[in-house]
Image (spheres, rainbow, N blue to C red):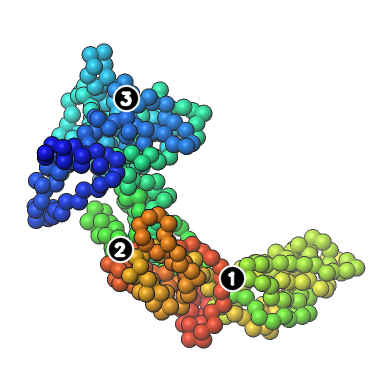
Amino acid sequence: APEKVIHGLQNAVRNQKILPVVFTSAEKNVGIPELMDAVAAFLPNPVDVREDALNAACASEEGKCGLTPGIEAGFAARVVHTTVDSFGSLSILRVISNGCDKDGKFESIPHSVVNLRTRDTIKIGLTAFVLQGKERVSLPNGSRILPGNVIAVPKLPDSVHTNDILTIPDAVNEEESEIKIEVSTKALTPLSRSSKDVPLMFCATVSLPDADGKKSGKGKVVNSGDDKLISALDAISREDLAVRLEQNAGSLLLHCMSGDHAMLIASRLKERYDITIELGLPPVQYKETISKSVVNVEGRHKKQSGGRGQFGVCLISMEPLEEGAGIEFESRIKGGVISKPFISSVEKGVREQLQSGGPLAGYPVTDVKVILTDGKMHSVDSNDFAFQSAGKQAVKQALSKTHTILLQPMEQATFVISDAEQGEVNSVVSRNDGYVTGSDSAGDGSGQIEISAILPSANIPAVSDALRAKTGGSGTFTSEFSHYQAVNDEHTVKSIVEQSPHRHE
């Protein structure tokens, strides 16, 4: 009988055994009535599943929100979306649970709630809306709020983010640790997750055009519109969990899902805030190191212009270290030819000079050991500045006498794709100077394959675009920094050196 089929579908959806798919087109207004009929027929009634939803929202291995599931539970709602415009923010709440009065009727929205993530108490104004398309329909004061209702509340604090749970103050256990959202399998929205768990595989520099409309070229925020731009991007990041901002070496970096996502963000900035931005490739953090040792290189600082002068001399040796060792400094001074305070001054100058960049492309020098072997000082004219300067000069001379190697950051990438796409992934990795380190079953019962590979960080954007084109966006991949590796291809080294913004002329 149809009734039994519908009942069986409802139970399967509730237990996440079936996920209904309805094909629609909002632009052409096709399939919308069918979608609404499917929601009414196949999805569980929010009132009936409020106990599951409340458990999912308020309980985890780390603690409970304090509400007892059931008809007597108090108000709890999840922020499912946030919009920000020139009039302020609007938070869309999906009501999970609500209390009842003595007559058994659901109560109205409370005037004070607690954000379970931050534990902040938040005042809710008297104005709340029901959204009907772009129209806001005000809820009369005292309106009953049922589980499953979707309501819009304006001007909540900036600390309220999408996916936050808002509940009544009495429901919070202060001694419990931070609540994780929807760890239960019986969640109304199983795809929701913390913003920190959203993998962001695209990164671009964000810059403003110069006053004459020309491109700045280096991805730096260049004029007085900086504050407006950053505020606008902060507002967009409140709406979209897959948008994050980062300040790095004078550049503003935008992290998002893909190149198309970045272009969408750019169009929103233009439409909403009349801000035009430029998107560029993120700076790659190259480094330099040496391949052979040099010994007894002198650094000298001497200045005499009347009165007390400046004097400091040091001799250093420099030798390469294994990858990842960083910078080591050792003093072998004997007989007090340089006093201990001035030895520290030499070390400071050495480290500053190595950090300021090597002779090849101006990137920081790493994986070297500097040994202070000898030096000279003057009882009157020697000082901290003189020996810092002597240390810097010694490093410059040592680097000019050895062979410098360019190092590039490498990423450990993990691809999850179907078996049929394995060849495409291997091909894309190989074309982008990477190599596959292993493959195995994804382990989640999906039948997909998990491929591990090492790739240059500079090629990650190209890999992302190529795989999206080859697989139609069906696969996923994540990456994280692995190690630094020498760039052996001469043409690649030449290109990186020529394009380096840090190159010493």
Q: Circle 2 is placed at which residue position?
A: 474
- Give the residue type at disc 3: Gly
Foreground pick, 73 / 164: 73
Contact, mark 3 vs mark 2 (Cβ under 8 Å): no
Q: Circle 3 is placed at which residue position?
A: 70
> Quadrant where the N terminus lies?
top left
Sequence-earlier tag: 3 or 2: 3
Question: Which SS class for mark 1?
Answer: loop
Give the x, y percent position of residue 178.
Answer: 47, 37
> Quadrant where the C terminus lies?
bottom right
Relative to 237, is 457 on the left or the right?
A: right
Vertical placement of residue 500 versus 254, above or below? below
Question: Which SS class for mark 2?
Answer: loop
Q: Circle 1 is placed at which residue position?
A: 364
Gap between marks 2 and 1 measured at Cα:
39 Å
Residue 462 visible in the current orientation: no
Vertical placement of residue 365 versus 13, above or below? below
Foreground pick, 74 / 400: 74
Residue 448 visible in the current orientation: yes
In the image, what residue occupies the spot 41% across and 34% down? 59
- Give the residue type at disc 2: Ser
In the image, what residue occupies the spot 48% across and 75% down? 435
Sequence-earlier tag: 2 or 1: 1
How many numbered marks appear?
Answer: 3
Question: Which SS class for mark 3?
Answer: loop
Vertical placement of residue 478 versus 128, above or below? below
In the image, what residue occupies the spot 21% across and 33% down? 45
